[in-house]
Image: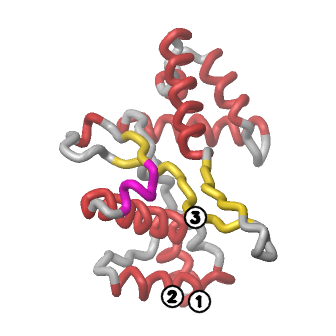
Amino acid sequence: MDLSVLEYSWRNGFRFPRHLATAVGKEIDQLRAEIGEFIDPKDVLDYARTHPESALYQCFDWDQASAAEAHWLFIAGQLLRAVKVKMVVYDETRPTREVIIEERQNVHLRPLGAAPHEGKAYGAIIDTLPIPQYRAQMIEAFWTEVIRVRTRYSHLHELDEVFRRIDEALKAAGRAVNPTPMQEGLDHAEGE
C-alpha cells in the first residue's frame, strides 16, 4: 500500500504568498495531467487568466500598469547583470595586442545601512569587493547558490562525488549539510 503524500512549498527565493503553495502545486499537477508531461509558462498564464477563482490567478498582478512596471524593472535588473565592461589597453609589442586592465561586472547587494525590506541595488564588483560587508554578502550569495544547485540536482547519482566534495566544502565553511528529503528517500529506498 502506497502511503506517499505530496507536500507543496515554495523554493527559497520566491516571493509568492506562502499559503498558496499547496493549491498552486495541485493546480499545476492538474494542468500537467491535462496537457502532458511538459507545461509551458503560457499554459499556466492561460489557465490563471481563465480561472479567476484559482490560486494561480492570485499569484499574478492583473493590473496592466503595475504588471508592466514590474516587468520593466525585471528587464532593467537583467540589463544591470548582463553588461560587462573590459578596460583594454592595446600594446603592439604583445602577441595578443591587448592587455586587460580591469573587468567590471555588476552584483546585486543590499546597500550598507539598508533594512532587509528596502531591497537590493547593483554595484560594480570591483568597487564593492574591498568593503567587508559587501564581500560578506557576496560570499553568502555564493553559498546559497551552491546549496541551491546541490539540492536541485541531488537526485543525479552520477554527481555523487561532486556532492561529496561540496558537502566537505560546506562543512569546512561551517555551513549545514542537509540532504534533501528527496535524497533521503532515495537513499532509504536503495538500502531496502
Where residue 2 sits: x, y (%)? 56, 64
Q: Nearer the viewer, residue 135 or 152?
A: 135
The residue mark sitting in front, 2 or 3, is 3
Q: Amino acid at mark 1?
A: Glu
Q: Secondary structure at mark 2?
A: helix
Quadrant occupied by the N terminus: bottom right
Residue at image position (34%, 86%) is 172
Instruction: Of the two numbered discs 3 and 1 on the same chain, state the one appearing first in sequence.
Output: 3
Where residue 89 sits: x, y (%)? 66, 60
Q: Is residue 176 left or right of residue 11?
A: left
For the magenta stretch, what is the residue range? 124-129
Magenta residue check for 127? yes
Q: Secondary structure at mark 1?
A: helix
Q: Which residue is mark 1?
A: 161
Q: Amino acid at mark 3?
A: Ile
Res. 77 visible in picture? yes
How many numbered marks appear? Answer: 3
Q: Secondary structure at mark 3?
A: strand
The dominant secondary structure in magenta is helix
Q: CA distance from mark 3 to mark 1?
A: 37 Å
Q: CA distance from mark 2 to mark 1?
A: 5 Å
Quadrant of residue 40 in the image?
A: top right
Res. 9 visible in picture? no
Residue 140 against residue 28 in the figure, above or below: below
Q: Which residue is mark 2?
A: 164
Q: Are marks 2 and 1 in contact (CB under 8 Å)?
A: yes
Residue at image position (60%, 73%) is 155
Where residue 182 sits: x, y (%)? 52, 69
Residue at image position (42%, 46%) is 123
Q: Which numbered disc covers residue 101? A: 3
Q: Amino acid at mark 2?
A: Arg
